Image (cartoon, coloured by chain):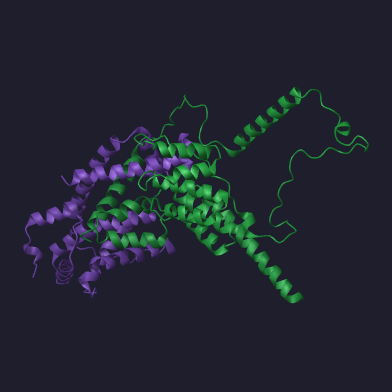
Chain colours: A green, B purple
Amino acid sequence: MKHCDGTPAKRNGLQYMEGTLPTVEADRLEEHYFSCPACLRVMRTLDAAAEEFAQMPAVAIPERRWSLIRWPVPAWSMAAVAALLVMGVLTYKRFQAGPPQPAVARNQAAQPVQAPAPTLPAAAPEPSQASSPVRLAQLADLALPPYMTPALRGERQDARFAAGMKKYAEGNCKGAIQALTQLPAEDAAHAAAFYAGACQMHLGDYAAAQALLRTVADAQNAPRQEAALYLLAQVSLAEDDAVAADGYLNRTIKLEGDLEARAQAELERIDALEKKKAATAHKLSHLN
Amino acid sequence: MWGFKQLPLGIIESRDNEGMEAETVEESERLVRAIASGDREAERLFVSLYLPKVKLVLKARTRGAEYAADLLQDVMMEALCALRGGQLREAAKLPAFVLGIARNLLNNHFRSMARQPAPLEAPDELLDPVDAAEALAERQEHALVQRAIAGLEAIDQSILQLTFSEGMKPGAIAERLRLNPEVVRQRKLRATKKLIDFVSRLSQK
């Protein structure tokens, strides 16, 4: 182990100490640092840090008076704000257009009054309730992940990356891809590849999306590794590839991050769907 | 042959303080042979080399439980007794042998908390001096880590504290500290790296 500079312990040591490193990798790390002085040193530093932090007084929650919005913003509150805005715009338009005309007069004067159509679109049927054959693609969530500007000290954003992300935030996927794919490999490589991949997924170019997202998913400790794996699972679902989706979701779960529960739930849905498919195929084979 | 009894005291002391020099296969073979022939200095050297490693395994696997200290003694005793009895045929496999004993005892402990390993005869006054050296090495490590922690920003200290002492994940930390989860994840990685690099740089001086 004369050539090791402690990278294995730097990469996995924290997860090992937290007890979140998968068993196989934990075993491998132990076997390694038993013979590697550099990694043993890193592990001892992490161990000492854990003890020091345990003795420190409890964390005080910092006051952030300058911020009106507190992270993380719950999805329901964002939905509520969006609904209020839509209602406000509709009400304004109605006032602008004058008093409302009776539906009968506007549309079908000669016909009897009918019940008004529902204002909300009917909810999409759950895969398990749909009458038509259910495909895996229906489970795929191809929505663009939100972009949050990191506020880290010392991190400068490339102007081209910022321009691409502005287009991304506007929902202009083609413009975002054009800007992000022009960035040199070393500049914001993972972030640019991730968001360009998400745009390609959104636009339906799954091969391009996979190529970009894999560069992030296969990079060790990339900040968006977990999200990239999750998106790769969505792309695989969109392509009706249950095996690949299963693999990516399992890798997402292994990282034990924020998407763990979502990936777990999605795996269960895939499993249920596959079982249903098998049962239908079985029935059909009996009928034939 | 490398006679441990004839080793200058300084060498053993420096090993005691560091406890982590890489052993070559030849060194392992000499160590194993010397312990089998009853060399107490070799036993002390063995303990100084392997105690920190076993301690880390037990702390990580038991999540710092109190019984880890008892298990540490048991592992070292069992390893020493096995080496004294010449049970290790391939000396090159000494690290794997010791790790195997640690894992076995841990598994036994987890299988039955009531079941305790058979009491072993403790080598006379063996562990005390090594414990003292290990304690010194730990104190030095902690002093460096304290300096490294003091050099971190308050927000990074909070993130690492919640990670290390409360086992919280970035999402939960973000909620607690009212930060963006992505920011927490990046700060955690950077702060850990900064801490390790700081300690590594100073300990090489």
Examine the image and state in which quarter residue B90 appears: bottom left
Camera-side residue of A21 and B59: A21
Q: How many marks?
A: 0
Q: Looking at the picture, how far across and down is residue B28, in whole percent?
A: 18, 67
For residue A125, above or below residue B184 = below
For residue B136, above or below residue B81 = above
For residue A89, above or below residue B104 = above
Residue visible at 61% across and 60% down? A270
Q: Quadrant for the N terminus of chain A, please.
A: bottom left
Q: Looking at the picture, how far across and down is residue B72, in whole percent?
A: 30, 58
Q: Quadrant for the C terminus of chain A, please.
A: bottom right
Camera-side residue of B63 and A127: A127
Q: Looking at the picture, how far across and down is residue B94, in whole percent?
A: 24, 68
Residue visible at 73% across and 43% down? A121
Observer able to see residue B167: no
Give the side of residue B165 with respect to residue B205, left or right: right
Observer able to see residue A28: yes
Q: Looking at the picture, how far across and down is residue B123, in whole percent?
A: 20, 63
Give the side of residue A212 with respect to residue A136, left or right: left
Camera-side residue of B22 and A67: A67
For residue B141, above or below residue B112 = above
Residue visible at 32% across and 60% down? A30
